[in-house]
């Protein structure tokens, strides 16, 4: 796979992707043309995110802040591993709001659950928009390898 394909991925993802972090995942591939290792990680993540979105929607309806926090924490780690910084940031906010915390570092208490739920709903909407963007970019990127995109 060419440096041009990686540059296109960076362009397609924009601020969504930390190319240095994602590049470390690509370095683990045995075959740069096939990219089996990184492809599996990326498409497993994309499937995981879609399942987790369903859970987030369910927990929003149930108004279960602790579970929302847990789901945010879960996705935060996965998105950080791939270098999806904007998704990671939204997940961290979900995690914090789920613990009734606000502020840049989640350092401020917010006792009003409804305010936290409204903020989580907004972050979930951002995550869903991000997913559309990065999913399309990753599918395009991996179509350029000898694989056929998602397996």
Image: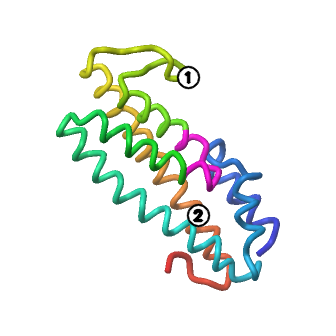
Residue 65, horizontal then vertical, whole percent? 29, 33
In the depicted structure, whether residue 148 falls above or below residue 104: below
Q: Is 97 positioned to the left or the right of 130 in the image?
A: left
Q: Categorize mark 1 by other alpha carbons within 10 Å: few (<14), some (14-19), many (20+).
A: few
Percent from the top left, x then y, of residue 6? 74, 63
- Residue drawn at the location 60% of the way across and 68% of the way down: 140
* Front residue of this view, candidates 75 and 17: 75
Q: Can you name the residue that lies furthest to the bottom here?
A: 146
Q: Which quarter of the picture shows residue 30?
A: bottom right
Q: How is the image coloured?
A: rainbow
- Above or below, 134 against 91 in this view is below
Q: Secondary structure at mark 1?
A: loop
Residue shown at 30% from the left, 46% from the top:
56
Residue at left 38%, top 27%? 97
* Residue annotated with mark 1: 105
| Front-most of residues 33 and 76 | 76
Q: Is residue 113 above or below residue 93?
A: above
Q: Quadrant of residue 117?
A: top left
Bounds of the magenta segment:
79-88
> Within 10 Å of the Cα at label 2, are there few (<14), some (14-19), or many (20+) other Cα atoms?
many
Say how many tags the image has: 2
In screen coordinates, is 94 left or right of 88?
left
- Residue, far left: 62
Left/right of residue 47 with respect to residue 88 in the rendered view: left
Disc number at residue 48? none
Say which residue appears at 26% left-offset and 21% top-offset: 113
Q: Which residue is mark 2?
A: 138
Most foreground residue, 6 or 88: 88
* Residue 39 x/y as whole percent: 60, 73
Q: Of helix, strand and loop, which one carries label 2? A: helix
Q: CA distance from mark 1 to mark 2?
A: 30 Å
């Amino acid at each position: 796979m060419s440096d041009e394909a990686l540059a296109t991925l960076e362009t397609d993802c924009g601020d969504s992707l930390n190319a240095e972090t994602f590049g470390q995942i690509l370095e683990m591939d045995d075959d740069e043309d096939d990219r089996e290792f990184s492809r599996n990680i990326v498409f497993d993540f994309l499937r995981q995110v879609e399942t987790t979105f369903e859970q987030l929607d369910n927990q929003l309806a149930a108004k279960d802040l602790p579970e929302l926090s847990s789901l945010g924490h879960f996705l935060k780690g996965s998105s950080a591993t791939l270098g999806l910084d904007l998704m990671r940031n939204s997940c961290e906010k979900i995690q914090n709001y789920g613990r009734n915390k606000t502020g840049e570092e989640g350092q401020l208490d917010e006792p009003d659950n409804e305010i936290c739920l409204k903020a989580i709903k907004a972050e979930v909407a951002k995550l869903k928009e991000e997913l559309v963007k990065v999913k399309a970019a990753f599918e395009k990127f991996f179509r350029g390898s000898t694989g056929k995109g998602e397996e």
